[in-house]
Structure formats: C-alpha cells, structure tokens
C-alpha cells in the first residue's frame, strides 16, 4: 500500500504534532502515521512494532486515521467509568446515607430502585460503595428469639 500518497499531512507537520503532544499515547499514534508517511516502516505491523504495538492495534490505528484523519488519532481517549449513576444521583445517594436511613446494602438497593430508578445487584451496590468510599453497610446482629420492638420498649421503660 502506498502510505505516502494516502497520508495527506506532510512529514514536517507530523513531526511538529508529535513534539507538541503531551500524552505519550497521542505522541505514539502520530509517530505511527509519521513512520508510514516517511517510509521508515513499509507496513502497519512494522510501524506498530517500532512504537510497541501488535498487528491488530496497528490495524485499528490505521482504520481510525482513514475514518477520522489525524484529528481522530489525537483525540484524548475517554478513561474511566463511573457506573450507572450521574453526579446528581450520587449526591442524592450520599444524602440518603448521611440521614442514616440505610442499615444494609439491601436498603441502598431499594432506595436506588424506588427513588432513582436504577437497578443494581447487591454485589454491584458493594462495588459502588467501595468506589465512592462509602463505609460498608451491614445490619447489626439480632437474636432470632428477640421480639420485634422489644428493644425500644425496654429503653422506654428502663430507669436511668
């Protein structure tokens, strides 16, 4: 394939863009195109090997260049995934937790489902709490023979 004719940017422009880029990822991508344009690498896999890519990754870079041009290669990749919740929903969840209305992960799950319309599994709730650095919510142990409301009744009737 004649990469010299298919790549429209000049070698000088590519070198300049390579020097300007602050992210190593983008610098390598522009360098990949420069290697093909200058003829230092005859194939995509050879150019990829110079910058440390396998053949499949080199093919992906070439496809991105063909579809979007140099601007497509210079786009910053979107890193990170914050899950199903938006920042406002996370704020509502934090307020719910600050109000001490959740004792267990199931309570958080029910709140998210009923109030925010987002469904999570219990494992997903656990991961969400870890990611948001929320203290683990577990129920306090209760004796199976304890009568419901007996603790409150005892607290009301006991003398200080």
Image: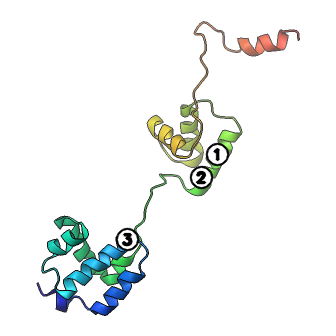
Which mark is in front, 3 or 1? 3
Residue 114 sits in quarter: top right
Q: Measuring from the top left, give residue 85's x and y in whole percent.
A: 53, 52
Distance (Cα) linking label 3 and label 2:
35 Å
Mark before the other along the chain sequence, 2 or 1: 2
Label 2 near label 3: C-beta < 8 Å? no
Identify the residue under disc 1. 94
Query: Nearest the camera: 25 or 83?
Result: 25
Q: Is residue 33 above or below residue 149?
A: below
At horizontal 54% and vertical 32% (from top left) the residue drawn is 106
At horizontal 25% and vertical 70% (from top left) the residue drawn is 51
Residue 89 numbered tag:
2
Distance (Cα) linking label 3 and label 1:
37 Å
Q: Residues within 10 Å of mark 2 (few under 14, many from 20)?
A: some
Q: Measuring from the top left, give residue 10's x and y in whole percent.
A: 28, 93
At horizontal 19% and vertical 69% (from top left) the residue drawn is 49
Query: Nearest the camera: 76 or 158?
Result: 76
Which mark is in front, 2 or 1? 1
């Amino acid at each position: 394939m004649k990469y010299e004719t298919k790549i429209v940017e000049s070698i000088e422009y590519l070198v300049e863009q390579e020097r300007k880029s602050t992210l190593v990822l983008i610098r390598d991508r522009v360098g990949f195109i420069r290697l093909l344009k200058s003829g230092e690498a005859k194939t995509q896999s050879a150019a990829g090997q110079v910058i440390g890519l396998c053949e499949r990754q080199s093919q992906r870079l070439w496809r991105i260049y063909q579809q979007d041009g140099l601007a497509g290669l210079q786009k910053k990749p979107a890193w990170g995934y914050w899950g199903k919740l938006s920042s406002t929903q996370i704020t509502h969840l934090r307020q719910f937790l600050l109000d001490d209305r959740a004792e267990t992960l199931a309570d958080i799950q029910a709140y998210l489902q009923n109030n925010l319309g987002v469904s999570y599994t219990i494992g997903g709730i656990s991961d969400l709490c870890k990611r948001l650095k929320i203290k683990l919510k577990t129920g306090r142990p209760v004796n199976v023979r304890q009568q419901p409301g007996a603790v409150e009744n005892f607290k009301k009737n006991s003398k200080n």
